[in-house]
Amino acid sequence: MTATTTARTTAAPRASLARSRALARTGTIVKYLSLVLACLAALVPLVTIVVLAFKTDDEYRTTTPLTPPGSWLNLDNFVTAFTRGGMLTGFVNTGIILVVSVVGTILIGTMAAYAIDRFRFRGRKLVLGGFLLATLVPSVTTQVATFQVISALELFNTRGAAILLFMGTDIVAIYIFLQFMQSIPVSLDEAAMLDGANRFTVYWRIVLPLLKPAIATVVIIKGIAVYNEFYIPFLYMPSQDLGVVSTSLFRFMGPFGAQWEVIAAGTLLVIVPTLVAFLFLQRYIYNGLTAGATK
Amino acid sequence: MTQIASPPEVAATVTSDGRRRGTRPGAASGGRARRRGGRVTPWLFLAVPLALLLLLTYVPVANLLWYSVTDWDGLSPVKEFVGLENFVEIFTRPEVFQVFFVSLFYLAGAIAQLVLALYFATLLSFRTRFSNLFKGIIFFPYLINGVAIGLVFLYFFRPGGTLDALAALVGVQDTPQWLGDPSVVNTSLAATSVWRYMGLNFVLFLGAIQSVPAEQYEAADLDGATSWHKFRYIIVPSIRRILGLSFILAIAGALSAFEMPYIMTGGANGSETFVIQTVDTAFRFSKVGLASAMAVVLLVIVLVITGVQRLLFPDEKKEDVS
């Protein structure tokens, strides 16, 4: 590298210019080649599942994973997955849990953030530290003990278990609200209070509406997290009727163990909503994850 | 002694100052309004969040510590105190070392994942055709449901599956049992984890690189900087913090690898990880005492790693707020 730069400044400028241009061209080729390879690595496993989902059982047995199906209109596997595989129950349960726990997370997160940001009170640092410390606890392992709490509350094998756990432990949401709330001027609160509003009115009528962008972020990252969560529903809601998207799909491995084309259809049914959400909400998803991951 | 102790103190006052300054505008004018809020009001807002925090995080952690010194089976009304027996058992059983050996695969995978993410983030930070398309495709796997990924890769790795078909295309017929052979299974599973999580690191790195003002690159261009110089002197410093954070998270993640191996193999064929062993000990073999001790061990390790991170990157919080 340094050789080319010094060469450029001294003798034979034309030759070195040609050389650096050639170097740049190889650089460009390597760059696009590696990007295409990365895309292939990301897409090939998914594309073969798409291909498989449209095959008949016979085709699955006789053709290789890379051969396209005889007909792209063969939807039998999707019908089987949706009706006999319990995917419908899964989507209904996931929908209920998602809506309730996202709303709960928003209320709890904004209330906590409002109290921490807008009040100075004894024990405030302790509360903040309490939330901070909790982010460090790896949640899968504490399930050993959380399980006893959930049983004691008699929530085992109810949707309430998942809802409570999703609502109660989202510290990242609290941080997103806290950071955003710092940018809302306190003078707005004060003006309202001079007009006679109390703290609850201020929270409900002023702070909550102004938090809309932060709420959108939390809805997106929480929504994705709840939709994708596997272990909590698996552990706390073993009943067939309480299957969510993840656990219903997980159970495909039993009855459809030999029918990979049905498993593929079920997998696609789970991936498609994510893909649609991603296509429509791309920018928000990128921003939300950046906000959430760095806490 | 006092001299050594003083710098952190100074740093602490600076941070608290900085934070106070952040919220000062309100505090200066709104002292009266704030006082009028009373002493009870904040606690009314905090009642539900705190109750859930205690109930679902601190009570379980406290119970975990208590169960870990008992021989409880999860059902019986009596929990007999056994002292440190569970911990002794953990560190004397040979299977435990096997499990930590498995996490080395995930650690190697995590490092590969960070290197790849950094490489692609750097590529896309320069002007690129279709950059949004590339970004979306590389990132999308991260959003997919874990069970769906598990099934996609069970099909990918199964005998006669996608990987074998691809190998046959290039003339390789004699492929191993990707998920059945204990000497290969962990590599396959760690690779699946890389496929799943790389997109997140990539997007985070790309975001950090792109937050560098364009003028810096323009100035570098005027000075005749090469791409390597820009990478070394502009890109690397701008992402040093997020890189450090990701690395620490990668270590913690490798130790607590769970979902992919649990969904795909259930821990069979030598793919059992520490967390799989913990939950199986608790929920399959009903040894809640022993499992709690294992959870405590993991908790302590994660806390130590995080402590190291805070020592190495002490400025993290302050930069975040600004």
Image (spheres, coloured by chain):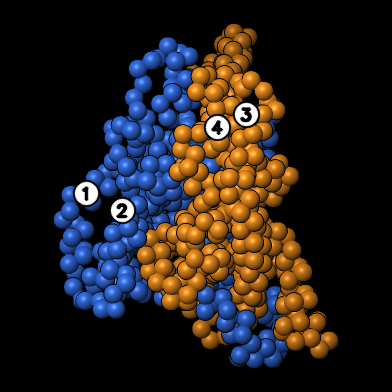
Chain colours: A orange, B blue
Report the front residue among B283 and B231.
B283
Q: Secondary structure at mark 3?
A: loop
Question: Residues at badges 4 and 2 in contact (C-beta under 8 Å)?
Answer: no
Mark 2–mark 1 CB contact (< 8 Å): yes
- When the figure is inspected, residue B109 is found, relative to residue B86, above or below; the finding is above
Q: Which residue is mark 4?
A: A261
Give whichever of A140, B310 is nearer the camera. Answer: A140
Task: Name the residue beneath numbered marker 2.
Answer: B277
Q: What residue is disc 3 on?
A: A54
Chain letter of disc 3 in the image: A
In the rendered view of the protein, which quadrant contains the C terminus of chain A?
bottom right
Q: Looking at the picture, does residue B175 appear above or below residue B211?
A: above
Residue at the spot 32% in from the left edge and 42% down from the top edge:
B268
Query: What is the tally of numbered marks visible in this picture?
Result: 4
Amino acid type at circle 3 is: Phe
Estimate the x, y position of residue B238 in percent, counting from the top left.
55, 45
Residues marked 4 and 1 touching at CB (< 8 Å): no
